[in-house]
Image: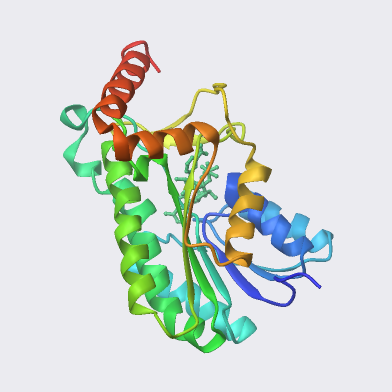
Amino acid sequence: MSFFNNKVVIVTGSSSGIGKSLAFKLGEQGAKVVINSRGGEKLEQVAAEMSGKGFDVLAVPANVGKLDECRQLVETTLKHYGRIDVLINNAGANMHGRVEDTDPEVLHLPLEINYLSALYMTKFCLPALKESKGGVMFVSSLAGIHGLPINAVYSSAKMGLRALAECLKAELTGTGVYVGIAYVGITENEQGKTIYNGRGEKFVRPDFKMLGMQSIADVADDILWMIRTRRFKHVFTFPGKLQAFLNSFAPGLVQYLLTKAYLRRYNNGW
Ligand SMILES: NC(=O)c1ccc[n+]([C@@H]2O[C@H](COP(=O)([O-])OP(=O)(O)OC[C@H]3O[C@@H](n4cnc5c(N)ncnc54)[C@H](OP(=O)(O)O)[C@@H]3O)[C@@H](O)[C@H]2O)c1
């Protein structure tokens, strides 16, 4: 029987990309899956497709960057299923632009979507997770290992997740609650994936190919493997592992390479 069979799992940001893949894989493995996004057609479509396959799914629209909406998402889950076994803090969005060019009114956006969402959701889920001796997963990025130029606020948010995961792991010692953080590497885009520009407007991220890129499905499999095996941290992809290694032993080289690669791409219109 699958590890996730009958477990109640919340996946934030699961109307597309990695979150959507996680939701389907969890459904296939017998979990009761709470899917989420800010709402709309895509979320309804994922819920309908999952129900059509006979999966147990509950769709809860909520902007997880907002405290009250996180509280509501957790309350709705508990009302419907009565327990929470796993929280996967997956919702996220990038913002491209130099800090000096970014509108100060939108600087908070990546922090809300990538960091505060995980903090709020975890805070509200903790009593239920302690009861179920369940687990919480934070979906970070290579931007959480070394700051990526042109991605400053996103990187700051993903680095914040590391501190949060490390502190929680210590605070939850002896409770049986698992904590994990996934440093996801460069992943193939879902077609039409949007990110923010420095004015806070969404635009479709141009598709690109890179050596060592992982598929969305493989990333989802690796995240579920981490939870099953209670692995605290994992750096995804060979380029990611190399970056993490060099970051410890030759941080100046990492800074040089990232500066060259990202500024060149940015100056060429990305
Ligand atoms: N793809 C990569 O290359 C990559 C690499 C490293 C790390 N990651 C991380 O992996 C995670 C998933 O990325 P992805 O590429 O799969 O992203 P994606 O395809 O853009 O999907 C993001 C999901 O989050 C939802 N979302 C965004 N803001 C939200 C909010 N405030 N409240 C609730 N839901 C929200 C989106 O739906 P709505 O917009 O409709 O709300 C969507 O369902 C993110 O944390 C990302 O930082 C991705």
x and y, in percent, of residue 202 in the image: 41, 35
- Left or right: 201 as drawn, with respect to 184: left
**What residue is at 31 percent from the left and 33 percent from the top?**
148
**What residue is at 35 percent from the left and 45 percent from the top?**
144
Question: Which quadrant holds residue 56?
Answer: bottom right
Residue 76 visible: yes
Question: Which quadrant holds residue 124?
Answer: bottom left
**What residue is at 55 percent from the left and 60 percent from the top?**
36
Q: Is residue 46 above or below residue 175?
A: above
Q: Is residue 5 above or below residue 82?
A: above
Q: Is residue 35 above or below residue 100?
A: below
Comparing 254 with 23, the one in front is 254
- Left or right: 47 as drawn, with respect to 163: right
x and y, in percent, of residue 162 in the image: 34, 56
Comparing 53 with 165, the one in front is 165
x and y, in percent, of residue 130 in the image: 48, 85
- Left or right: 252 as drawn, with respect to 184: left
